[in-house]
Amino acid sequence: MAEQEEVLDIEGQDDIALVKRMQDGRDQIVGEIKKVIIGQEDIIDELLIALFGGGHVLVTGVPGLAKTLLIKTVADILQVDFSRIQFTPDLMPADVVGSEVVEESAEGGRQLKFVKGPIFTNILLADEINRTPPKTQSSLLEAMEERQVTAAGVTYPMSKPFFVLATQNPIELEGTYPLPEAQLDRFMFKIELGYLSEDDEVKVVSQTTQTHDSGLAHPLSGEDILEFQRIARQVPAAEAVIKYAVRLVHASRPQSETAPDFIKDWVSWGAGIRASQNLILAGKVRALLLGRYNVSYGDVRALAPSVLRHRVLLNFHAEAERVTTDDVIKRLLEAVPEPSSEI
């Protein structure tokens, strides 16, 4: 089906050059990542889409799949501040955002001073985020949504860009806590890492059991990322494409009149409005990286699994029938038609 073509809403050659730099920067980052990470091309692409779109990413998978290494490599490549927090059961909110301490002044008096925690950075690696209780997990909520932290009635802005990359192990593994729904909804994507192919695993074993100096370059800065986030929002999305994204999200809600029967049978709670927003925003970035100046239905479909899989909550009927969230999303994409009559 033909889709409506639109021209990028830009002013002058500077924005055109910025789009080209964004595409080149993506290729350069991928090239550097491949010096360290074998395979996982689709995962890397989605990670960069979120980065260029200003979204946060939750990466999940069993231990030993290089989740932490992938995220740390991205941070090493970019010329930005980086912090890592190892989430553990005894971690407290103050260990994340900071706390007030008593400090003596030059005059001999005492006053409270706020000491910023590791969250005040550009890229935050929240490693094994589901190994800490929900109380500590929730300390990230304000920073992830509003790019600020409030402590003792004072609001402290975050540095820009601010990007949370969190890893988690599947909740069926021992010693983990499920993330609250409000926390999950702050992530643009939930990306699942699977096992490598046999050939890729052979390359990993060969590379990691000998002397190897990756010598990573630094092709982009934090200012570049902010410019990419700005230009991505200028990409137009046809009203029909936006409606398609919204209809997908509406159809994921069992309470909706448009929900298919399998949604009503298997889903206890569907995706919220952030899902629609993230489908379109991430679609804009994907379109630019693929050399297009408009968002297509294909962009929405390609990104739907990563945008929806942590926002669609299955009920016990689905678990009893061994239905996964990805199974539901696949059927949802088949059930919701593109609004062809509106284009």
Image: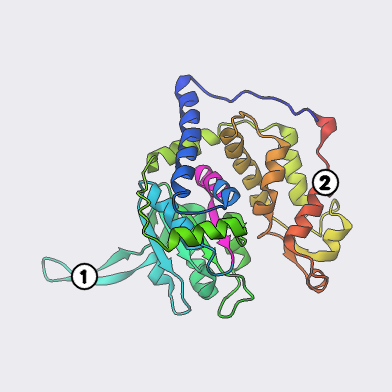
On the image, the x and y values in percent for residue 295 come to 66, 34
> Tag 1: Cα neighbours inside 10 Å, few (<14), some, or many (≥20)?
few
> Horizontal and vertical percent for residue 123?
42, 54
**Does 296 appear above or below 159?**
above
Q: Which mark is residue 272?
A: none
Q: Residue at x 73, y 37 (%)?
A: 297
Please report the bounds of the magenta region as a residue range: 46-61
Question: Can residue 142 be seen in this snapshot?
Answer: no
Q: What distance separates the C-alpha of mark 1 from that of mark 2?
A: 60 Å
Picture layout, residue 42 above or below residue 2:
below
The answer to which of 294 and 247 lies nearer the viewer is 294
Q: Looking at the picture, which amino acid does disc 1 mark? A: Glu
Image-based side of 141 in relation to 326, left or right:
left
Going by the image, does 127 lie left or right of 236? left
Q: Position of residue 318 (x, y in %)?
A: 80, 68
Residue count near mark 2 (Cα–Cα under 10 Å), binned few <14, some 14–19, many ≥20: some
Determine the image quadrant of residue 110.
Answer: bottom left
- Label 1: which residue? 103
Q: Nearer the viewer, residue 121 or 69?
A: 69
Which circle, 1 or 2, is nearer the viewer?
Answer: 2
* Location of the N terminus (image quadrant): top right
Q: Residue furthest right?
A: 261
Give how far across and how far down residue 113 sits, in percent: 27, 66
| Residue at image coords 81%, 60% | 254
Whether residue 160 can be seen here? yes
**Residue shown at 85%/64% (left/top)?**
265
Of pointers 1 and 2, the one earlier in the residue sequence: 1
Q: Secondary structure at mark 2?
A: loop
**Which residue is denoted by mark 2 in the rendering?**
336
Q: Residue furthest top?
A: 12
Total number of numbered discs in the rendering: 2
